[in-house]
Image: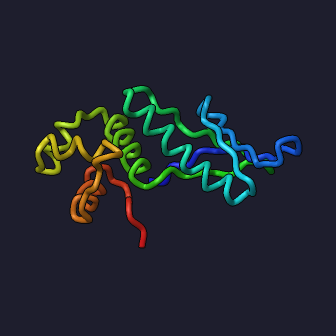
Amino acid sequence: MKISYPAIIKYSIKDKVFNVEFPDLPGCFTFGDNENEAILNAQEALTGFLESIDSRKLNIPEPSKLKGKDIKFITPEKNVSFAIWLKKSREKQGLSQKQIAQKLNIAYQTYQKFEDPHKSNPTLKTIIRLEEVFHQNLISV
């Protein structure tokens, strides 16, 4: 279920900061005074960028598998990661929100909230039922 995007993190001698750019997400960039701060800021920038794309009903690009010495994989906050994963999993199966809600035996409006990063807060019981519906392990303890 983990969604991570590659970020290019490079030190700028001119600006004396670590710049961060997400090649898969044009316009998503940030910086930090040190590498750790840059990574924390990158997670915040990625989370906000993905929330913005989702709220405008735009297609969220799949993360690429870039490699290199300046590449670090950044994961958005869990509420965003979960909502994106859920939506993409449902769409891959060609199912509507209503169909998934019926499989879970919950109200359509309740399921809708699970795909909204601002409202998503499923119970552990619901997550286990989602694992059964999508045939994927969401929780590894």
In the displayed structure, would residue 66 be above or below residue 1? above
Measuring from the top left, give residue 127's x and y in whole percent. Answer: 28, 59
Measuring from the top left, give residue 99's x and y in whole percent. Answer: 18, 38
Q: Residue at x 28, y 48 (%)?
A: 119
The image quadrant of residue 53 is top left
Q: Residue at x 61, y 30 (%)?
A: 27
Left or right relative to 63: residue 119? left
Q: Residue at x 17, y 36 (%)?
A: 98
Front-most of 44 and 9? Answer: 44
Name of the residue lying farthest toward the bottom? 141
In the displayed structure, would residue 60 be above or below residue 118? above
Measuring from the top left, give residue 109's x and y in whole percent. Answer: 15, 41
The image quadrant of residue 23 is top right
Coloring applied to the structure: rainbow
The image quadrant of residue 116 is top left
Left or right relative to 95: residue 61? right
Front-most of 30 and 94? Answer: 30
Front-most of 127 and 117? Answer: 117
Q: Residue at x 62, y 29 (%)?
A: 26
